[in-house]
Amino acid sequence: MTYRSDDDYDYLFKVVLIGDSGVGKSNLLSRFTKNEFSLESKSTIGVEFATRSIHVDDKIIKAQIWDTAGQERYRAITSAYYRGAVGALLVYDVSRHITFENVQRWLKELRDHTDANIVIMLVGNKADLRHLRAVPTEDAKAFAEIENTFFTETSALESMNVETAFTEVLTQIYRVVSRKALDAGDDHATLPKGQTIDVGTKDDVSAVKKVGCCST
């Protein structure tokens, strides 16, 4: 097999993590990109992103996954954070019902700031807290069906379904892009490398970080 460098990819997709503070977004990100989990729970300040590449069919898909804190005081970063996103993991904590109740608001904000074709995965995290469960799987599954999103439950701690959640989102984005190319009469295999989806620039990241942690 021919070696390909980290910069060698066929598609670059921006995926955002959204949801209330403390639902485990950062640990989902670190589990997927570095296979790490931290018991030291600290809120993300501002915005961070990490990358990882996967294979879908015979293509290399590079994911640029953005993570930000869920507290209201960070909301000033909204437009730059969502810009160019083609996928999202909307995360709640299965042991805290209020985080599930707030999913509707997060979903509205996401859809207000992104393309109609964005691929959304509703994620019930901390499924390892079985004795503390406050959100029945059936309720979340029903909500996902109504809102036409994908759904899974994960445990970043136990590394359960984390790989599946991210991989499914990236695969579905690839399917959307491929369909668009075919609808346009193009051969998706010959789409220019890295040109398919605009995930923003480093300047966008800098602009987001300049907002800081406590803007109103």
Image: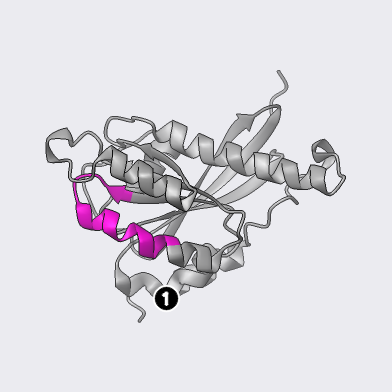
- Magenta segment includes 102: yes
Foreground pick, 200 / 122:
122
Q: Is residue 40 left or right of residue 215?
A: left
For the N terminus, the image quarter is top right
Examine the rendering and report whether any part of residue 212 can be seen: no
Q: How is the image coloured?
A: one colour
Examine the rendering and report whether any part of residue 84 can be seen: yes
- Magenta segment includes 63: no
Q: Is residue 144 left or right of residue 2?
A: left
Foreground pick, 135 / 24:
135
| Amino acid at the residue labelled 1 | Ala
Residue at the farthest top position: 1
Residue at 48%, 47% in the rendered image: 149
| Horizontal and vertical percent position of residue 25 | 35, 49
Residue at 44%, 32% in the rendered image: 163
Residue at 73%, 50% in the rendered image: 196
| Horizontal and vertical percent position of residue 11 | 68, 43
* Residue where numbered disc 1 is placed: 76
Segment tinted magenta in the rendering: 92-107
